[in-house]
Amino acid sequence: MLIKIYELLLKHFGKQNWWPVVNKKNKRFEIIVGAILTQNTSWKNVEKAIKNLYKNNAFSRKAILE
């Protein structure tokens, strides 16, 4: 039943692209990082943090772990 409702909504509204990503190449990882960061701060600050990570060439699993 839930799948049927989802399919009807998807057909009617289409994909929503609900997560604003900065870099489409890192979309999945950026969503993961954003979801974690947004637990402790506002979305405005999450966007700033992600942009700063990219600006400083630090947006990678390895760089974040270091």
Image: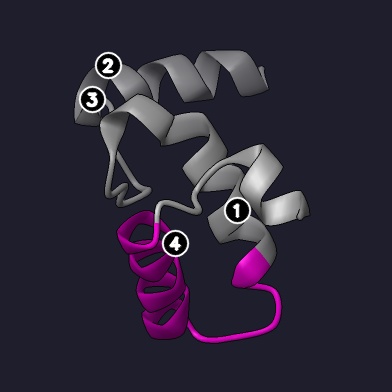
- Kind of residue at disc 4: Leu
Q: Residue at x 44, y 77 (%)?
A: 43
- Graded by Cα atoms within 10 Å as few (under 14), some (14 to 19) or many (20 or more), the crowding at tag 3 reads few
- The circle on residue 14 is 3
Residue 64 is left or right of residue 45, and the answer is right
Foreground disc of the pair 3, 1: 1
- Badge 2 vs badge 4, beta-carbon distance below 8 Å: no
Could you say whether the residue bearing mark 1 is in a helix, strand or loop?
helix
- Closer to the chain start, of discs 3 and 1, is 3
Work out whether mark 4 precedes mark 1 in sequence or the reverse, and give the earlier one: 1
Residue, disc 1: 33
Circle 4 — which element? helix
What separation in Å lies between label 1 and label 2 (alpha carbons)? Answer: 29 Å
Distance from Cα at disc 4 to Cα at disc 1? 11 Å
Give 11 or 29, whichever is nearer the viewer: 29
Image position, residue 39 (x, y; %): 69, 74
Image quarter of residue 4: top right
**Label 4 packing within 10 angstroms: few (<14), some (14-19), many (20+):** some
- Give the residue at mark 2: 11
- Whether residues under marks 3 and 2 lie with C-beta atoms below 8 angstroms apart, the answer is yes
Dots 1 and 2: beta carbons under 8 Å? Answer: no
Quick one: SS at disc 3? loop
Q: Identity of the amino acid at label 2?
A: Lys
